[in-house]
């Protein structure tokens, strides 16, 4: 009986701590004041980008590297943009709630790595060209770009979503956690694709295709692909849509 009382008290205390934590989180949210301003920042050259938080990011390829932020005036101080070892890092250091969507305009000459997470939405404003690009998308982030590259590598997780048009000679795609890839208009020569956790991909491949599917994932492919390796587990499926 005594042990039962102790367990009951422990459960009540646990729920109390969780409730207090939720209330504190709500109180600590900093809301936007509605005064939307645009601020340009001075940044050093960079080759990699890492962004996390609820931002809409417009990618613009140009002749210089530059960045500007458009959001509530009182929230500017809580958005951190810094260059660390040739890597541009964009994040917030407080729990903020803008009155309108926070927008970042990122102009770059060339990048080799792009890592986005946490409800980020990234949109390519013009046709982007890369020699080799690695993109990691997680935490329900979204990416929509028109691009071309000799080599591309995409790593998706956590219900992420990407939409691609353009072309790539070689593409390596790894998607998990109910992620989705819409790339019917993205022409790939040779491709290695690994889908798991109920992920879905629509790909256009004209050369060699290596496939591994598991966890009720599905691959729909277009083009004249030659399947060199095919591993399908569970309720996964592959469909030729030619």
Image (cartoon, grey):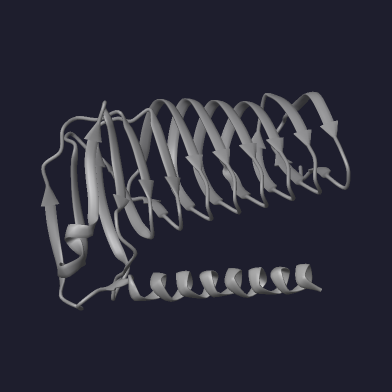
| Residue 150 can be seen, yes or no | yes
Residue 130 image-quadrant placement: top left
Number of marks in the image?
0
Q: In this picture, is 122 found above or below 195?
A: below
Rendered position, 148 above or below 59: above
Nearest the camera: 62 or 27?
27
In percent of width and height, residue 36 lies at 17, 71
The quarter of the image holding the C terminus is top right
Left or right of 147, for residue 190: right
Q: Residue 65, percent across and down?
A: 19, 37
Residue 128: image quadrant is top left
Say whether residue 72 is visible: no
Question: For residue 157, which quarter of the picture?
Answer: top right
Where does residue 22 sit, x and y in percent of width and height?
47, 72
Residue drawn at 24 percent across, 55 percent down = 79
In the image, taking residue 226 as reference, residue 232 lies left or right, namely right
Image quarter in which the N terminus is found: bottom right
Determine the residue positioned at 72% across, 29% down. Answer: 225
Q: At which x and y percent is residue 124?
A: 37, 48
In front here: 11 or 23?
11
Q: Is residue 114 above or below residue 9?
A: above
At 52% from the left and 47% from the top, the residue drawn is 138
Viewer-side residue, 14 vs 74 = 14
Q: Which residue is situated farthest in the right direction here?
A: 234
């Amino acid at each position: 009986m005594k042990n039962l009382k102790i367990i009951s008290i422990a459960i009540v205390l646990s729920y109390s701590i969780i409730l207090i934590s939720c209330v504190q989180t709500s109180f600590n949210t900093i809301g936007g004041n509605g005064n939307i301003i645009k601020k340009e920042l001075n940044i050093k050259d960079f080759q990699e980008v890492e962004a996390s938080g609820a931002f809409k990011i417009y990618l613009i390829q140009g002749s210089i590297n530059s960045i500007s932020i458009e959001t509530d005036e009182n929230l500017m101080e809580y958005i951190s943009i810094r260059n660390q070892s040739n890597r541009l890092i964009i994040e917030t250091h407080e729990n903020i709630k803008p009155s309108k969507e926070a927008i970042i305009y990122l102009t770059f000459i060339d990048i080799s790595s792009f890592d986005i997470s946490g409800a980020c939405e990234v949109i390519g404003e013009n046709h982007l060209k890369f020699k080799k690009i690695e993109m990691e998308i997680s935490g329900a982030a979204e990416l929509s770009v028109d691009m071309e590259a000799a080599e591309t590598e995409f790593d998706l997780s956590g219900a992420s979503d990407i939409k691609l048009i353009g072309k790539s000679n070689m593409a390596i795609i790894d998607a998990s956690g109910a992620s989705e890839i819409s790339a019917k208009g993205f022409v790939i020569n040779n491709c290695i694709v690994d889908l798991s956790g109920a992920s879905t991909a629509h790909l256009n491949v004209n050369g060699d295709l290596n496939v591994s599917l598991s966890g009720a994932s599905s691959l729909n492919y277009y083009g004249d692909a030659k399947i060199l390796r095919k591993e399908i587990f569970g309720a996964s499926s592959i469909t030729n849509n030619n």
